Amino acid sequence: MREAESLIMNSVEQFCRQRLGGDEVRRRDEAHQPPYDLVPAMAELGLIRAPFPESQGGLGVSWSLFCRIQERLGYHAYFAGSILNRFVSFGGMPIALFGSEAQRAALLPEILAGRALIALALSEPEAGSDARAVRTRARRDGARWRLAGRKTWISDAGGAAYLLTLSRTAEGPGRDHALTAFLVPARASGISMTELPKVGNNCMPSWDIGLDDVLVDDAARLGPVGQGFEVVTGTLGFSRASMAATVTGCAQAALDLAIAHAQERRQFGRPIVQFQVLRHRLVDMRIEVEKARVLVYELARRIDAAEQTGELSAIAKIVATEALQFVTEHGMQILASAGYARESAMQRYWRDARLYTFGEGTNEIQREIIAGHMGLR
């Protein structure tokens, strides 16, 4: 088993070195180039199929190993780990867990082969952290549904085949039973998309989406009517484990860059790493990265053991994303002007990191989830 895992990790590392070198990652960032062209190679390596059981066309790889894969991808380029997370956690997992037999038969092979990306269309102008406040509506029209509303800040929607769209199918804002999930073809009539300019994460485009009387068959419904909230939240343990692992890889890369600079940069006749204040700052950065890594691997272990992960997934998301912010903030201070230069990887880590504490569920909401598990509400 260890030999097989070593072979997989060696293949991942070789892929990263061939396709995600420092100059190439910088070029993609400056060109705002999404990583969709990398997906066929990732699929060929089996990365998308990795955590799915063999009965569903997967490789049956443990989540412990999958998180190591995600961490390594994140070390080289966050966007590589992010696109893999979308195929696995927002595409394959919802269909594997909640899809009908027909949906699994038709869509899982396409997703696992990297041919069908699914974007999670959850956030709205008035519904982000408060996902139960969704206003996009779906009303029955015979054997079909008509959807109308607006979604915003939807990552990778422009490259998606389907939008996993949470919609209101009954009255009663704020009630879970009023929400239903649909797999809406991204090019369906009535859908309009506008790309949103951002500060960072240039390789992960975000979109504002209008749904104007979009007609879909009932076969597009994912899960029972009224259980859309469960469909979306039921896969968050996977997505947060994947995200936390990828973020941890980014944090390690930023730490390594800071260490290398501190060892090479000389001031007052000696390398700046010899100044205790900087040594201790680097130690504190290392501590934050290790805390994140330990939590990620424990979360993966619990997923593998089919244990409850709601509370720990929230903790791991908080710790990993805040560790990355801590490391990049201090990394920028250590590199100083060298880090502020456009060609520096540190400035990219720094500006990209700002997204993750509120992307995919704000850290404030994660703390509310944890409070609920503690019985503090």
Image (cartoon, rainbow, N blue to C red):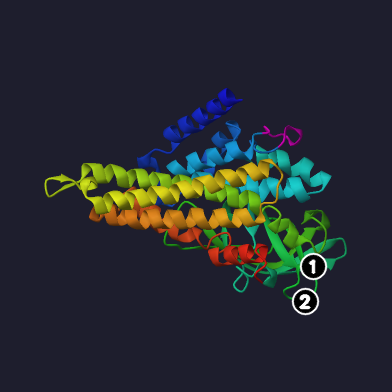
Q: Is residue 134 left or right of residue 76?
A: right
Quadrant of image for the N terminus = top right
Foreground: 61 or 279? 279
Q: Secondary structure at mark 1?
A: helix
Quarter of image, res 150: bottom right
Q: In the rendering, at what x and y percent does residue 375 appear?
A: 67, 67
Residue at the (55%, 29%) spot, across then down: 8
Q: In the rendering, at what x and y percent does residue 53 appear?
A: 72, 36
Q: How many other residues sit within 10 Å of disc 1, few (<14), some (14-19) or many (≥20)?
A: some
User: Majority secondary structure of the magenta segment?
Assistant: loop
Q: Is residue 225 left or right of residue 111?
A: right
Magenta span has 54? Answer: yes
Residue at the (59%, 45%) spot, across then down: 298
| Mark linked to residue 57 | none
Q: Is residue 99 visible?
A: yes
User: Dots 2 and 1: beta carbons under 8 Å?
Assistant: yes
Foreground: 20 or 257? 257
Residue that badge 1 annotates? 177
The stretch of residues the image draws in magenta is 53-60
- When the figure is inspected, residue 67 is found, relative to residue 228, above or below; the finding is above
Q: How many other residues sit within 10 Å of disc 2, few (<14), some (14-19) or many (≥20)?
A: few
Q: Secondary structure at mark 2?
A: loop
**Alpha carbons under labels 2 and 1: distance apart:** 9 Å
Residue that badge 2 annotates? 172
Q: Is residue 188 visible?
A: no
Magenta span has 237? Answer: no
Q: In the rendering, at what x and y percent does residue 343 appear?
A: 30, 49
Quadrant of image for the C terminus = bottom right
- Earlier-in-chain disc, 2 versus 1: 2
